[in-house]
Image (cartoon, coloured by chain):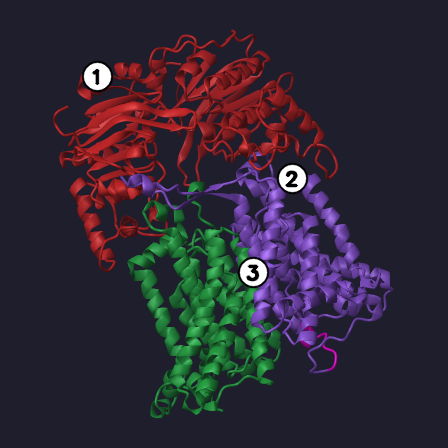
Chain colours: A green, B purple, C red
Amino acid sequence: MSTLDFIVALISAAVLNGAPLMYGTSGEILTQKSGNMNLGVEGLMFMGGAFGLLGAFTYGNAAGDSASGVVAVIIALVCAFAAGMAGSLIFSFLTITLRANQNVTGLALTIFGTGLGQFVGELMRIRVGGNVSISNALKVSFAGSPFPKFLQDIPVAGKLIFGYNVFVYLGIVMIIVMHHFLAKTRKGLYLRAVGESPSTADAAGINVTRYRYFATVIGGGISAVGGMVYTMTIAGTVWNHTGLSGEGWIAVALVIFCLWKPINSLWGSVLFGALLILYIRLPIPFIPTQIYKVVPYIVTALVLIMVSIRQKREDQPPAALGTAFFREDR
Amino acid sequence: MHEKTPLIRLSKREDMPKARVWMIRLGAFIFALLIGMLVFAVAGADPIEAYVTIFKAALGKTTGIRQVVRNAIPLLGTALALAPCFRMRYWNIGAEGQITMGAIAASFFAVHCRNMASLPLLLIMGVGSMVLGGIWSLIPALFKSRWRTNETLFTLMMNYIAIGIAAWLIGGPWEGKPGSQIMPVFSSNAVLPKVLGIQCGWIIVLVLTVVIFVYMRYTKHGYEVQVLGESENTARYAGMNVPKIIMRTAVLSGAICGLVGFLIASGTHGTLYSNVAGGAGFTGITVCWLAQLNPFAMIVIALLLGVLTKGSSTLQTSMAIPASITDIITGIILLCMLGCEFFINYRMHFRENHAKEAK
Amino acid sequence: MESVHAVELKGITKRFGSNTANDNIDLYVDRGVIMALLGENGSGKTTLMNMLAGIYLPDEGRIFVGGKEVTISSPKDAFDNHIGMIHQHFRLVDVFTAAENVVLGLDEPGRLDIKAASAKVKEISERYGFEIDPDKKIYDMSVSEKQTVEIIKVLYRGADILILDEPTAVLTPQEIERLFKVMKAMRADGKVIIIITHKLNEVMEVSDVVAVLRKGKHIKTVRTAETDPKELTELMVGRKVELNIDRKTPVDPKPRLTIAGLTVKDGEGVKKLDDVGFIAYGGEILGVAGIAGSGQKELLEAIAGLRRIEEGSIIYSPEGKAPQQIVGKSAMEIKDAGVAMAFVPEDRLGMGLVGGMGMTGNMLLRTWNKGKGIFVDRRAPEKLASDVMESLEVVTPGIYYPVRKLSGGNVQKVLVGREIASAPSVLMTAYAVRGLDINTSYTIYNLMCQQKDKGVAVIFVGEDLDVLLELCDRILVLCGGKVSGIVDARTATKEQVGILMTSVGGKGGKADA
């Protein structure tokens, strides 16, 4: 294998493995920008993975040979997104309306979500009597590139630009839209104000509760799609909870690494995706593979330390992160 | 004129009678079980039968009860460890990692002091686990007290680093059969003895319950932690050394978590796994919180979760329901209990019907 | 009264519990007028204006804007009526730019256009002579710049009636001058400006009319040109109140604290105390007077060892012991040496008390580290709590009942009682009677006198000049972190002290100690 081939293979593998993180992270960024810290991402991604698979599988069975790949992808997306919205709606209700502690509620959501995801995954397996899988024709529409073959066949660029699955492109568009929303639009500005100083936002007539619900529920939906992307692409449309476990926590780490800026998650998720697989692709003799795997967390911890020492204001977490808002507390 | 008072107005409530508080909590628990029945029904099982199976399996036989206690040990230990931190409003969610580091330290001595007599070896393992767990917890606390580095996120990262280190050890230096990625079981002198058929860790955590209760309530340290948790200004005013208190409490918490790691590795598994903590570090947080930081309430909640875990592992075999339903039920119970605190802490004032007056 | 006033209040009453903050107030302002709302702390100025700004709803009374009766139940309603208020505590998002803060919460149609907003901010700035960079982040701004952003925020929303709550409290003399220039420019533009203040020199300098409030009542409105500081002071403070404080002549006062050249800076490097020097004697009460934020808090904290001291010395000479330098000692050491402090902050708790604990737990705050062993001794504080409860008549269900749930007066009794119980040789109190009714206040004054008679050096930071003059032996006046004078409380007049309080930058004449 030539060096160029190796690099191309490495990059495309990194992007492939980074795609679930892209969703998980950007969803959580949106959530945290509103001042809500949802530690339930792991649970949401499990739910998204299981329900996405369930949706595609049910559709595939019902439609049989006439199943359309596009429809299957859309159904999986919708199912995963809806599952994530439902999960984060529970979180929102508890933390925003009932003012429960965010950390504890997030962890409870993780317990609930991983349990539910695993339950659905196993139940499908028990009902089918073996591994759940969808037809190869449908698989291609999830894992294959949406671009025509001649584009993919362009040397180097074909693989690097046109060779990814549809969720990679969708994720990039979503992140750019989110970046634009947060940075340029009025609602985005107001949302950031809610996360920085809810009492200021409230005094300016912004409905803090509504913004927090909005960001947390949409963000949770996006995060959950990340779990579906993992199941339907990397795991090959098979329920694989050992593979999926930990993705949600890496996504939370990546939020910090990206300094709460969605645009950074574009390259951040590819970098973390690379770190996840580097031990296979680029083994260094004296570094054990398991230590490779903790590099993302070490890097994130270092970023966290540096950010707190440098005290650059733009890089700080949203000032009100993790706190409930109660007007009469002012 | 239009009054813009909202439909429901909230105010903080301070003094609900104790009996009513527990009625609300009990109500939330029952509500959660009802939702759980729905889940069973969706899964295609008879909900009543399922609950009966759970409780029979967990409490019907001695072996069941033993398993319940075994399940409860790490949860109770972790919850106890976290109580001082949470009282101080220091959000240590790194218990999972601190447990893992404790288990690693214990395993280190189990591997390298194979030939020692059992009691000294166990003592060394215990102390070692506490030291390493404490150090692991000190790192984020150091940065918190010096630079106010966010401890929630930092301790979270430390979890995964610890798990990675454990994975490396069992797949590398301490690997048994080459390529197995499994560490051989401890020699028998490194395994905690059993009392009443359960590893003696249950005695340790029960003693710890009393110790933590006394520590939080009657000691100078406990007082400092409580003052600091309420107001850093007041703590400084009273001449307390705030960074020192933060670090000391974090180390204490990490040390107890480390000890829990030792109990799991030596008492439960007799070996080290990379996921030796098995989520106890996270579930312990919810146990601690739901118990309102009261050590004795933690016993009840930890046992309850122990019953659910044991019972639903039986469900899988007897009723063909995936065991992961425990996590769903546990999650529902936790979420309901978290939510019900609202009705204890806040009073709702409904808007009186102004619409009629206006007309 | 035939012409239409820009704003008119009729019969406004506002009560908080049993306390009447505003009592049947009638007031009006006309277009193109700067009105000063003058009154002592607690006279109800801010409460009254908060009802125009939509923070509170009046219990009784009516509000007219431009002759039309209006209901203002939210800040948004206030803006709809072109009223904007600049509060003492700024409501700004730190990481946003000035322009972003200005547009926050607006329901403007269409896309967010920060450039257009910036341009409009610039335009407003130029019109009134502000100096502000719309793209500068708030956290990079000085207090004065932040205030400017708040004013622009209000103007951007189309306010014609601006209310400024103590705008000069946080500004330097130069910044104050600039602010006044801006206010005059706005007046020329036909706007109504209401400035809440208790500084007479500012009233004289900038206002057209002065409305004086005292104890929640509107006393009188006068034209500035037709009055003088002396008359305003009389209106503001009223007839001299007779207080029955048993003030004895100090017996054999000995220097207890000798302070020289004390300089303290805040986190941003601004001098909060500047070359402060004085002597506090045992057996006397030294009053500390000054406008809020003149360095009172910093002075007490510096003595108590809670603040870094840049320069200066504090010599502490306890009875029968050798004098010692206490600069550089820890708070704990200073406290153990017999220097007690009871500081009542604005929220009453949060400094010196733990709201979630009962009286016992709070008594323990002074003695928690005493005694050997790892356990705290709760018996002594328990007894102390019972004693304080009895002797000061603290109304509480029990000594374990959380102090947060007690009424303000009782909270303060717990705090002051605890400090006195430590048998200090220096007792510092700040705002000990903040928000208390007359009777409870007297309990506290008498406690101070008892301490003085025991030979304690009492330092009493207060707000009410009548009380200071009646209670204290000498009064030290702080102004902008400097000692502007020390007067004999038995011979000094209120006016004399008032002038010392406001003699910023040498204005208002020098006083002799």
Q: Is residue C68 left or right of residue C479?
A: left
Q: Which chain's residue wears label 2?
A: B
Q: x, y (%) of residue C23? A: 33, 23
Alpha-carbon neighbours of circle 2 within 10 Å: few (<14), some, or many (≥20)? many
For disc 2, the marked residue is B223
Same chain, labels 3 and 1:
no
Three-letter code, disc 2: Tyr
Instruction: Report whether residue A260 is seen.
Output: no
For disc 1, the marked residue is C227
Which of pointers 3 and 1 indicates the residue nearer the eye? 3
Q: Quadrant of residue C484?
A: top left
Alpha-carbon neighbours of circle 3 within 10 Å: few (<14), some, or many (≥20)? many
Instruction: Report whether residue C288 is seen.
Output: yes
Three-letter code, disc 1: Thr
Which of pointers 3 and 2 indicates the residue nearer the eye? 3
Q: Which chain's residue wears label 3?
A: A
Q: Which mark is residue A287?
A: none
Q: x, y (%) of residue A122? A: 59, 77
Q: Is residue C309 left or right of residue B266?
A: left
Same chain, labels 3 and 2:
no
Question: Does the residue at mark 1 contact the one at mark 2 (Cβ under 8 Å)?
Answer: no
The one nearer the camera, B26 or C65, is B26
Q: Which chain's residue wears label 1?
A: C
Q: Which mark is residue A107?
A: 3
Range drawn in magenta? B169-177
State whether residue B352 is above or below residue C440. Answer: below
